[in-house]
Amino acid sequence: MPEDDDVRLPSVLLASDGRHCVHPPPGLDAGVLVRDTDLSALVHRVGSDCPPAAIDIDTVAGLGADDAAVDFVTGRLAIRIVLTRRPAIATRVAERGGLGLVHIYGYDSTGMGRSLESHPRLDHVGSVLSPGLVIAHLRPDELAQLPRPLLAYGLIDETEAADACLALADAIVVRPVIAARMAAAVVAV
Amino acid sequence: MFLLRGNGLTLVPVVHRIHDAGKLVAVHADLVGGIRPDRSGVGWLAAAGVDAVISSHGQLMAAIRSDGMTAIHRLLLVRRSQLDSAISAITRSAPNIVEILPGVIFPAIADMMPPFSVPVLAGGFIRTERDVQASLTAGALGVTTSSTALWGTNGA
């Protein structure tokens, strides 16, 4: 991927099912993550005035888990940030000039270690820590093992927790209502 | 004692050693090597003298119970949007115990979950007595931890 064409991961991704338009609140470095949707809804949302910055490709019903699907998402749909549990998909996204983020499951230290073993550890392939809320409980050496950029995703449901997670990760995923509260707090400061 | 790794096909001596120490043995059917987490795999563990079987597969709970073992259903916390379906799966599977992972965040998300009719264990990244106490206060009956310093602590 050319260096002058690096994909930038917004600090905050707003989780959406893509069936309704979601606009990031002003004042927040934010984009929209579409997940738990279907292919038709995704294509419709891309053509709207609130296109997603990122998708969780494994949760799009009707979309395959192969190179053709990646090429469609990163090419035709121009979505350059792709979350996936499949290292090969994330690698393909990176080869196509995007940012692939591989799910790392942080249920316990043993499981996280196993999950990390399959990470491709390539440029432009980062990590999604699931559930994101656990990031505040990782030791520094565990945190250092997670390939960057690092997205904390899951169960971050209060602004205080969001701020704490964002201090450790490069980006977080929250519901729109939490993002609105974060933006309001920024304005208030 | 929870066994989360190792060879599920050669468990008998390990089970004997743990029993000789006066402890019960719970084996994670999804994680130990050599066995498949299905009805036959559960039967193999029962024959090995295992006291309890842990799995994320709800459909195994009935088989575990019918083989006379304690059924522990692991609830893996991922996202809020998946919580309802995960809790429904536990209601259907009717385990004897629910183990919630990562347990260290159980205190923060306990109010998102309904009360369970069976005991709850919290496991995963529990490393300090403070983590243990927070889980117990949030409603867990106990915690599971690989931090040996906590073994024997009230709740661990």
Image (tube, rainbow, N blue to C red):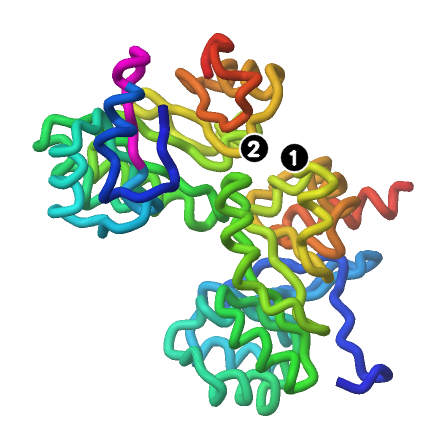
Which of the two residues, B95 or A147, is positioned nearer the viewer here?
A147
Q: Which residue is disc 1 drawn over?
A: A137
Q: Which residue is disc 2 drawn over?
A: B125
Quadrant for the N terminus of chain A, please: bottom right
- In the rendered structure, which segment of residues is drawn in magenta? B19-27
Dot 2: within a 10 Å radius of its alpha carbon, few (fewer than 14), some, or many (20 or more) residues?
many
Residue reaching furthest to the front: B13
Q: Residue at x 51, y 39 (%)?
A: A108
Amino acid type, mark 2: Phe
Q: Is residue A63 magenta?
A: no
Q: Quadrant of residue A137?
A: top right
Task: Identify the subunit bearing mark 2.
Answer: B
Residue reaching furthest to the top: B154
Q: Is residue B22 magenta?
A: yes
Q: Residue at x 32, y 20 (%)?
A: B119
Q: Is residue A34 left or right of residue A13?
A: left
Q: Quadrant of residue B43?
A: top left
Which of the two residues, A117 or A182, is positioned nearer the viewer here?
A117
Q: Is residue B44 left or right of residue A138?
A: left
Task: Identify the subunit bearing mark 1.
Answer: A
Residue reaching furthest to the right: A189
